[in-house]
Every structure is written in C-alpha cells, then in structure tokens.
Amino acid sequence: MRGLIAFCAGALCGLAITPAFAVNLSCTSAAALSADLAAHRLTSQSLVRAYEARIARINPKIHAVIALNPRAMAEARASDARRAEGNSLGPLDGIPILVKDNIGIAGLPTTAGSLALANNVRSVSATVIRNLRRAGVVILGRANLSEWANIRSEHSTSGWSAVGGLTRNPYMLDRTACGSSSGSAAGVAAGLAAAAIGTETDGSITCPSAMNGVVGLKPTVGLVSRTGIVPISHTQDTAGPIARTVRDAAMLLTAMAGSDPADPATAEANAHRTNYVAALNPNALKGVRLGIADFLLKNFTPKTLAVFHHALALLKAEGAVLVKVDDYHLAPIEKHENLVLLTDLKADMKQYLAGSPPAVKSRTLADLIAFDDAHRREEMRWFGQSLFLKAERTRGLEDPAYLRARATNLRLAGPDGIDRLLKEHRIEALISPTQNPASVIDLVNGDAGIGGGDSTLPAVAGYPYITVPMGQVQGLPVGLSFIGPKWSEARLLGFAYAFERKARAFRPPTYAPNVLRWHPSKTLCGN
C-alpha cells in the first residue's frame, strides 16, 4: 500500500519491533513517531530507511529534497543506542527532519540554492541546528528553496534554485510551492520527513506552509538564533518550524529557541522561551477575543474567503469572540520595507561571506552579482538579479534614509500597528487567511500570480505568527493565520492547536498534474 512501511517481527539495534507494525508516512506526525520510538515499536534507523525510500519514490515528482545527509543513519543509530540504554534526549530524539539549504550544517554545503556557494562547507553548524541536535533530532537531508531566499529578483519564480531546480506543489504539480521555504513545506506535506526547518524574512515560512497544507510558525525575531544562516536582513530574518501538526511545531520550537551570544537579537530569548507543548490546550479558544483583520481581506479571492468564513464559524463554536478590525493601512510600511531589506542584505551578506571557507571566492554582494553574470546560463535562465543590483546601490547601515525607514517601519508595524490594534480592540490576536490557493507556476512572468497574503505586518514588526490548515479550494490548501504580539508564541500555538483539533483540515496530497485531473483525497488523517 502506497505510503505504508511495514516492520516485521524481529529486532533492530536490539529493540523489539511489534509484528507487522505500520506507519503511514503520508499522515503520521512527529509526535506519533516519537511515541512509537518510545514504545520500541520502531527505531530511528527504520524511520530513516523508510523516509529515504519514500524520497527516492516521491521526490522526483516535486524536487523538495536537494540531498540526503550521508550521516543520517549514523545519527539514527546513535539515537537508538541512547534509547536502548534508557538515555533518550527527549521527544525529538531520533526524529528525521529536513533543513532548508540556507541553514548551516557542519560538513555539508550550505548553498542558499546558488552555485556561488557550492563549496560553502563549514566546520560548525548554525546555532539552531546545534540546539536541535542536543534534542536528538536526525538531520535527514537538505530542502530546496527559492534561490537566495527569494531576494535576487522582483520577477523570480518561487521554488526555483540553480542547485535544486524547481520545487512543485504536491497537491497539484503545475502549481507553485511558494517560497522561499518551498522544499521544506512541500517535503513535509509529501511525507518525505517528519518535519522541517525553514526561514522567513517576509512570508517565507507561512506562504509555503499554507499553500502546501501544513503548519508553519514564524517566531518573534530574536527567539531563535540566526548565527550560521545565510542572511537577508538582521531586522526581519528568523528560522522557524514547518510541521504536519501544531504539536510537532511546538516540539521543534521548544528545542530551537534560546539566547545565543553570537546573535545580539536573542539576548532576551532565554527569558521568554518555554515548553511550548505545555501551551497546547484544546480549550484555548474559549472566551478569547480575536480580531478579524478586515484591512487584509481585500487580498483574498471569494473562494478563499468562503473557506475563511467557515473557519470563523468553527472558531465561534469553540467559544472565541470575533471582532472586526479595519483601522489599519499597510501602504506606509510597504513603502519602506524594500529599502530596509536591501540595505541589510548588502551589509549582512558581506559579514556572512567573510566567514566562508577559501573555496568560496565570493566575498561581497558585488562578487555574487559578478558570479551570476559569469554563469548566466545556469543562474539566470529564468530571471535576473534586479534586487541584488538595487541592494548593491544602497548606502550602508548608517545611511540616514535607511535609519529613518527602519525606525518608522518598526514603529508603524509594532507599537502603532499590532500592539495598538490588540489594545484598542481588546483582542489577543489577529486572524486572517494566510494566502490564496497556489497559483500556476510561471517561469516567464515569475510570481505574478502570488499576491496579497498577511505576512508583511508581523514580518516588519518582528512579531510571531502561525498558519494552520483551514481547508481546501478545489484540492489546493489554504491556511488560517494567528498573529500576535512579541513573545506570544505559546498563546498562538494554543489557539492554532484548538482550531486544528476542531477543523481537522489536513488532507494528504494527491500529486494531481493539474486541476482538470484532480480528484478529492479519500484519505483522512487524524491529528
């Protein structure tokens, strides 16, 4: 049966395996796998084998995984040995995950999808990876991404990189997986790993998560270290979990979060991090006032809004009090965001490249631009580098125009934005559809079909938000967002968990070639 891996009677690494025990990798969660590992019904090694076999079968359709980690089996073997000795590191010990290819993993190339970083093999992993490994996570492989996390061109096609090719949406193969964490989200949706780690500057976790029907959490900027991650902007960058369920995302965030002396933005992280799994209360929505972000709803199609209105009915049924919020305008912060991001990009990229091994010849953004020009056939087959060129023309982090734009945007999005709206309307979070259904991939015009969405306000503020599946539009997933104030991850996870239990909206992908040949999934997955 497709997607089912049977484990026969016997012993693997000294652990008894229940006869004919089966795991449906299309539906199973990291939490369920954790319980099975703890009960010795399977081993981490058997999981790695199962996922590698599934990647070999499914990945050629969607190109979510760039490469497997050659040490994954050794990591799994070490996890099984710990468990056999009664020394498990916790619920994530032995769980195989994918990692976006802009997050440093010692001994493996970290390319951000660009051939310019093909030899960027460092001796030290990103802090977030070291944190996850302390929890026993097995790094299964590298996930594809939109090259340079989608900051190279205004006319890029999400999900494409010179290193990894084009990631496709597993629900319909002619549709975008969005970006930039395209492979991370598509890989989780397709059951190619138990979970994944992505990064976001503005929408790069939440958009692909919503369009691929999974859970994605963008944390508060400063809760998770960025050390060892290929940057766009120290103002807005963060890593975050992408998972099948809210519980899985909470498990990952608990391991990922924490202060890092090498990343000054994380100075307060230890004071705010918590056990996020403990916040998953099925009654979290009872009596909670939530603000419907009416000022964003013009971005969404009637079919998306129909699913959203059904989600609102479910929220009410769970006891939430819904309040319309329409007294905000995004235009002023949208006006300044590019100047902030592009100025940060030039400075932050130079700092990152300075730590590259000698085999990486590019040391500045200008060097990367020259590399792309010299390798146009491989690097610029589908789109150019207009944003790189604009970033190169910026005037540095001391530029008065940059400083004004950054200060203005942080105020408009944070104290005068999310904070004000929550206070004046006496609400605990804003809610909105995350994105419209995935548009058709367009390698000529780029992402012209991906518009709207709700990511910019929390992205610019540096505040957290989470997307959770709320339904489908003709076989294409759409997500519901909960947006909160700084350090409110625990509350948002609680709201999302209560909604997820009520909605039960996840359906495994069907890999339909297009909407004309799509048929509703007959498989229902429990959470």
Image (spheres, rainbow, N blue to C red):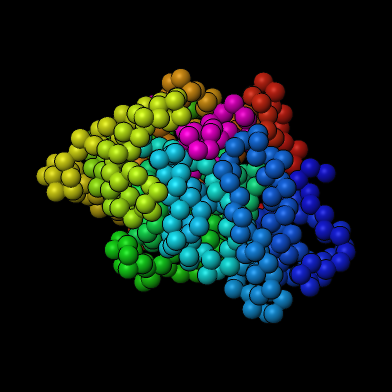
Give how far across and how far down residue 125 sits, in percent: 45, 60
- Image location of residue 241, percent across then percent down: 51, 54
Q: Is residue 271 left or right of residue 143?
A: left
Q: Quadrant of residue 389?
A: top left
Q: Nearer the viewer, residue 351 or 31?
A: 351
- Tell whether 393 sits left or right of 143: left
Is residue 460 found left or right of 174 in the rendered image? left
Asked if residue 93 shows in the view, the reply is: yes
Examine the structure image and report whether residue 175 is included in the region drawn in magenta.
Answer: yes
Vertical placement of residue 476 versus 17, above or below: above
User: Could you tell me which residue is drawn at 43 percent across and 50 percent down?
Assistant: 120
Residue furthest to the front in view is 358
In this view, the residue in front, 301 or 30, is 30
Q: Is residue 302 left or right of residue 195?
A: left
Q: Mostly what secondary structure, the magenta segment?
A: loop
The quarter of the rendered structure image containing the C terminus is bottom right
Please give the name of the residue rendered at 31% of the width and 34% of the height, measured from the top-left corner. 369
Quadrant housing residue 404: top left
User: Residue at the location (61% across, 50% down)?
Assistant: 68
| Residue at x 82% of width, y 58% of height | 7
State yes or no: residue 16 in magenta. no
Q: Residue furthest left?
A: 400
Q: Is residue 253 visible?
A: no
**Part of the protein shown in magenta:** 155-184
Tally the marks: 0
Residue 333 in the image: x percent, y percent? 26, 39
Residue 148, position as x, y percentages in the image: 40, 40
Q: Quadrant of the N terminus?
A: top right
